[in-house]
Image: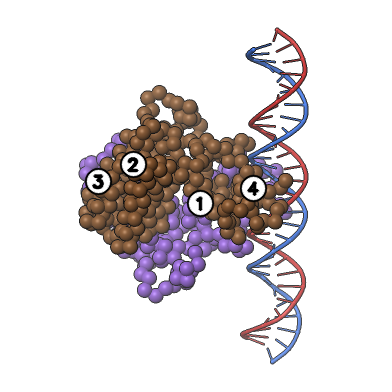
Chain colours: A purple, B brown, C red, D blue
Amino acid sequence: MGASAEPARSRRAGRSMPDRVDESHIVERIYSAVMEHRLPPAQKLSELKLCEAFGVGRMRVRRALLLLSDQGIVELESNRGAFVASPSRTEANEIFDARSVLEPAIAKQVAAEISSANLAMLKQHVLLEDEARESGKGADLIRLSGEFHVKLALASGNSVLRRVVRELVTRSSLIVGLYGTSNRTVCPDHEHSDMLGEIERGDSDAAAAQMFEHLIGIRAGLDLSTTRPEESDLKDILGLS
Amino acid sequence: MGASAEPARSRRAGRSMPDRVDESHIVERIYSAVMEHRLPPAQKLSELKLCEAFGVGRMRVRRALLLLSDQGIVELESNRGAFVASPSRTEANEIFDARSVLEPAIAKQVAAEISSANLAMLKQHVLLEDEARESGKGADLIRLSGEFHVKLALASGNSVLRRVVRELVTRSSLIVGLYGTSNRTVCPDHEHSDMLGEIERGDSDAAAAQMFEHLIGIRAGLDLSTTRPEESDLKDILGLS
DNA sequence: TGACTCAAAATTGTTGACAATGTGGGATGG
DNA sequence: CCATCCCACATTGTCAACAATTTTGAGTCA
């Protein structure tokens, strides 16, 4: 049964869908699913399933998967298909190294010139985080913790910065799923709130320092030591991309 | 004459080609051509021409173009094809804003922990720049000036940083082509050399400051004022992607 | 039971044909 | 001479069939 031969509209009741689904829509949805830990690392992404899910032809799905693989969210294995990426410990360290370089600089910039509207947005977001933490909604908290970093970049008003952070945060979400040590897998309690305080005060350097420490804190909640190589690191070691 | 139906090997004598040309090869080649100002902004990229040039089927070319458009190097217009991107002044300012945030942080990081081998590589590169400047090889100088920034990111040993900088520098190359004011279109004379000095001394903050000033210098050689909107800015103003 | 073989089924990769749209040029008329 | 219309051509977008590869599972044998 070809998925794309159907009436194309009037899909199964639950989810509303734009009339014209293009690649970017599929990409966005998979990004969200990864951020919310609904798509675990190494999950198979069958073309047929995706075609049915989005009511789209195979070409669209393949193009979306190509874009996602270029962004490190998906891995394409020849003749085997697409899988949600499973970053090796080496890759994970690289990603957090990059975040430790880039995100403090972004926090610094945002602290230097944030609009009141964006400040309010971030405050609102932190409130949501507190709410999720206190009501024990672990899944929501994980998602919100990641989204904070994206919204902070968004507050810079610069789409390039937003895009870079979004990619890194989403990949980090996969890393947390793979290497998170049971408890405290997400951002330590009130660091987001503290950072926001520095931003509100306009203390750029303090905000940058806070972000740097914060990222160290996140990494501390992960098991990223590469003393003994593990499964998905073999390809790194053997030098097979 | 179908381009992909030929013997597939033994192409025209000049250029050697990998036996198996995949999307990333096409992407790399177009990146290089843009960096070297051999592909000007708004240049049409016909699928057929690219198929012939690379000896590849249309699918490969289309996928490469999709990746390039996702990275802002190429613009896809529906039913009209692919063109080398023409960043609007608004986009150009956004890109340089992002560079002014990210690259100083990268320079800081590199200054803090560069290997002697990478330091030597950068010194060698600056020598090449001097050579090109003194022998009046303007085209080479433009290319080398951009490459310096990429190589600096490369010296961090972090592929994420390298990738981000490479994308931004390549887009900047398009911006220089569009908005560069005749003379001094590239990096002011010895700033790369000065920056390298700070890096060698291990003075992180000085290196970061130098990079920041350097980027301001580059922007000063461009005409990016958006007082009266121009051609390609219309789409920004009208809110059409 | 467990390991192995092999063929059927399922999935992915690629190609070519066709439809849809944009482009250019010549004829026509003012 | 210039503008407009219209048709042939060229290019892009989409799809469906086919080829290649992997996966599955039943069957066989030790």
Q: CA distance from mark 1 to mark 3?
A: 31 Å
Location of mark 1 (residue)? B28
Q: Along the line of sight, which residue is nearer the eye, B45 or A153? A: B45
Which tag is nearer the camera, tag 1 or tag 3?
1
The chain that hosts pointer 4 is B
Corner quadrant of residue A156: top left
Amino acid, disc 2: Cys
Instruction: Classify mark 2: residues with Cα within 10 Å, few (<14), some (14-19) or many (20+).
Output: many
Q: CA distance from mark 4 to mark 3?
A: 47 Å
> In the visual, does A98 lie left or right of D23?
left
User: Upstream in the sequence, badge 2 or badge 4?
Assistant: 4
> Mark 3: which secondary structure?
helix
Location of mark 4 (residue)? B52
Q: Are marks 1 and 3 on the same chain?
A: yes
| Image position of A88 with respect to A213: above or below | below
User: Upstream in the sequence, badge 2 or badge 1?
Assistant: 1
Q: Which mark is residue B187?
A: 2
Location of mark 3 (residue)? B209
User: Upstream in the sequence, badge 4 or badge 3?
Assistant: 4
